[in-house]
Amino acid sequence: MWSLLITVAFRQNDQKPSVDVKTTSIEEIEKELGDIKEGIRPKNWDETSVLESVGTDADITKRLIEWFYSKGVKVSFPKTLNPTIRFMVNQNGSAHKICDINGAMDKGELWLSFIEYSNLSPFDSDEKRQELIDKINSIGGIGIKTESINNSRRIFISALGDESVYAEFIKVYDWFFDQIRE
């Protein structure tokens, strides 16, 4: 028996899809599916791979990374499907995730971990996390839903491309770090 196999794959370096259509046997399809599963396993990343994965957002991403380093946060590169850099702080002997920067399809994503902030004083109160969201929402071009106080939310890094938006975002997170270190 013969079947049609359509494969859509993403090349690792440029993340652009390639399509391959061919007529093949069931055995060949099973082999192809095994190869595909191998290709989607989590990988170890580094700063360079994250910067390469964010495409035109690389300059803004680099600025964010340098700013987080200046705040003395712990930086790690978790084993994930997409290139990721994680920023964490220690408070009372416990590590808490602040955010992740992910590269996906040539776009940078900043995932703010409001749910993680619920374990981080003084943001362990809904009111304080809501105050943070309100401060973020006062920045033009960024909107976080109110119900996000118990979730993680994504901001496209390109939203920080305007210098005034970037400066306001940094100002909000300077306030955030001042709050957690009091």
Image (spheres, grey):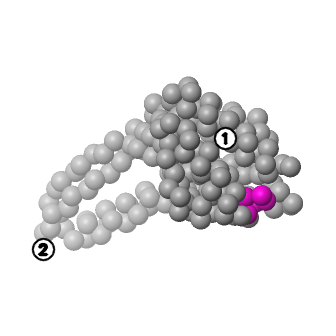
The residue where tag 1 is placed is 172
Question: Taking the image as drawn, is residue 96 in sight?
Answer: yes
- Say which mark, if any, is on residue 1: 2
Tell me which residue sits at (59%, 65%) in the image: 150
* Side of 94 relative to 78 (left or right): right
Residue type at the position of mark 2: Met
Image coordinates for residue 181, horizontal then vertical, percent: 84, 48
Of pointers 2 and 1, the one earlier in the residue sequence: 2
- Say which mark, if any, is on residue 35: none
Image coordinates for residue 94, horizontal then vertical, percent: 81, 62
Nearer-the-camera pick, 156 or 104? 156
Tell me which residue sits at (36%, 48%) in the image: 10
Nearer-the-camera pick, 144 or 151? 144
Q: Residues within 10 Å of mark 2 (few under 14, many from 20)?
A: few
Tell me which residue sits at (50%, 36%) in the image: 140
Q: Is residue 168 above or below residue 28?
A: above
Image coordinates for residue 25, horizontal then vertical, percent: 19, 68
Tell me which residue sits at (76%, 35%) in the image: 70
Magenta-highlighted residues:
120-124
Residue at the limit of the structure toward the top, as seen here: 163
- Look at the numbered disc 1 and give the secondary structure of its residue: helix
Residue type at the position of mark 1: Val
Q: Is residue 78 above or below residue 16?
A: below
Q: CA distance from mark 2 to mark 1?
A: 62 Å
